[in-house]
């Protein structure tokens, strides 16, 4: 089983309108509502890959019930911890080729709720071959909360794929127990080391810093131009096929799903890289976030080029 963690999930509401006017009524007929959050994007892709996946985090209120119902609809095991607060909404308004986002901060997690989740995580991680942890922390959780989860996963012998940024990622990298894989983009990598990074050679140099020691996989996503990947002492530049992107949102989450599924399938080195990066490309070709077309998978894997740095 692959266990996905989304501690600050949301109901993602997407409004598509021809124009958006401030201080006026904007009527919408094209509306979609989905179980959202980075980890749930990972969950959806894993489900499409027909992996055995379970989702966990915090859920509360009617919006939390909506997410539970969505997971149930797809037959995905729900390991979420119930909370008193209300799960958040995240709204995207699509207009004239632009996207305006309105993101709620989410509920505040109590000490008892935080402790309850960790107790359940300690049990659930024993069933998992791989754990993915994605996104931000809700209010009320200490910034070392991910570190506590890493310690629990290490005791269980379960690798963790961590996809977060800023001080949360820095905190995890400075901790004694490291994630198995991290996936910052090139700008998040620059934030980590305090220097702008534009070129592939600069990325290779950055990834040789002591900060990244003892992390088996570092995947630096470069958007439509591919990725730079470090595995142990090996460095690779990945070039992806040219596509007409429809919706690149969630492509990073899809990469995490691809690496998680690839690890579950025991793929090795460059085979794993091709599989993981392919999921990000396929997501960008679909309108729905966290969605892939499996009929295009073999084509994309064959088109990916990997060069040793």
Image (spheres, rainbow, N blue to C red):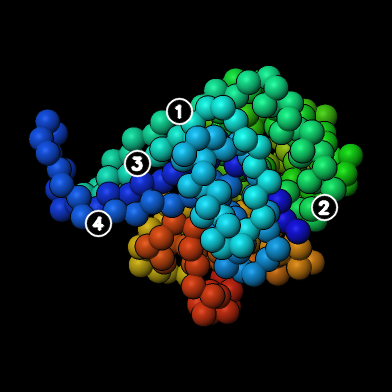
Dots 4, 2 in contact, CB < 8 A: no
Residue 130: x, y in percent?
A: 76, 53
Residue 263 located left or right of residue 200: right
Q: Quadrant of the C terminus?
A: bottom right
Residue at image mark 1:
105
Q: Circle 4 sits on which residue?
A: 30
Q: Left or right: where does residue 212 sit relative to residue 285?
A: right
| Mark 1 surroundings within 10 Å by alpha-carbon count, few (fewer than 14), some (14 through 19), many (20 or more) | some
Q: Residue at x 52, y 41 (%)?
A: 64
Of the numbered discs 4 and 3, the one sitting upstream in the chain is 4
Report whether residue 220 is seen. yes
Secondary element under disc 3, as helix, strand or loop, is: strand
Task: Assess disc 3: are there few (<14), some (14-19) or many (≥20) residues with their C-alpha within 10 Å of its C-alpha.
Answer: some
Residue placed most toward the observer, 42 or 55: 55
Cα gap from disc 1 to disc 3, whole angstroms: 12 Å
Residue 168's x, y, as percent?
Answer: 62, 29
Residue 216 at x, y percent in the picture: 78, 48
- The residue under label 3 is 91
Mark 2 or mark 1: whose residue is earlier in sequence: 1
Q: In the displayed structure, does residue 17 sit left or right of residue 277?
A: left
Residue position for label 2: 127
Q: From the image, which quarter does the N terminus lie in?
A: bottom right
Check disc 2 and report its element: helix, strand or loop. Answer: helix
């Amino acid at each position: 089983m692959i266990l996905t963690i989304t501690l600050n999930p949301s109901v993602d509401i997407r409004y598509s309108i021809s124009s958006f006017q401030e201080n006026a009524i904007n009527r919408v007929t094209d509306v979609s509502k989905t179980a959202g959050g980075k980890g749930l994007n990972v969950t959806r892709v894993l489900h499409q890959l027909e992996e055995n996946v379970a989702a966990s985090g915090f859920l509360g209120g009617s919006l939390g019930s909506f997410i539970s119902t969505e997971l149930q609809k797809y037959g995905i095991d729900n390991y979420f911890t119930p909370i008193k607060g209300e799960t958040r909404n995240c709204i995207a308004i699509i207009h004239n080729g632009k996207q305006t986002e309105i993101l709620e901060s989410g509920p505040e997690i109590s000490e008892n709720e935080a402790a309850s989740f960790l107790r359940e995580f300690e049990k659930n991680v024993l069933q998992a071959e791989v754990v993915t942890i994605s996104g931000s922390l809700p209010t009320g959780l200490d910034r070392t909360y991910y570190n506590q989860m890493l310690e629990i996963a290490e005791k269980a012998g379960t690798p963790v794929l961590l996809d977060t940024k800023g001080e949360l990622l820095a905190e995890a990298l400075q901790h004694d127990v490291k994630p198995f894989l991290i996936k910052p983009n090139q700008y998040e990598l620059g934030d980590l080391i305090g220097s702008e990074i534009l070129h592939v050679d600069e990325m290779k140099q950055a990834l040789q810093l002591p900060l990244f020691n003892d992390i088996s996989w570092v995947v630096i996503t470069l958007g439509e131009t591919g990725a730079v990947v470090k595995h142990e002492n090996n460095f690779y530049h990945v070039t992806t096929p040219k596509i007409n992107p429809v919706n690149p949102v969630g492509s990073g989450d899809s990469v995490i799903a691809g690496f998680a599924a690839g690890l579950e399938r025991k793929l090795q080195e460059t085979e794993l890289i091709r599989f993981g990066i392919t999921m990000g490309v396929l997501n960008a070709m679909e309108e729905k976030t966290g969605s892939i077309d499996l009929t295009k998978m073999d084509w994309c894997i064959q088109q990916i080029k990997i060069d040793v740095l």
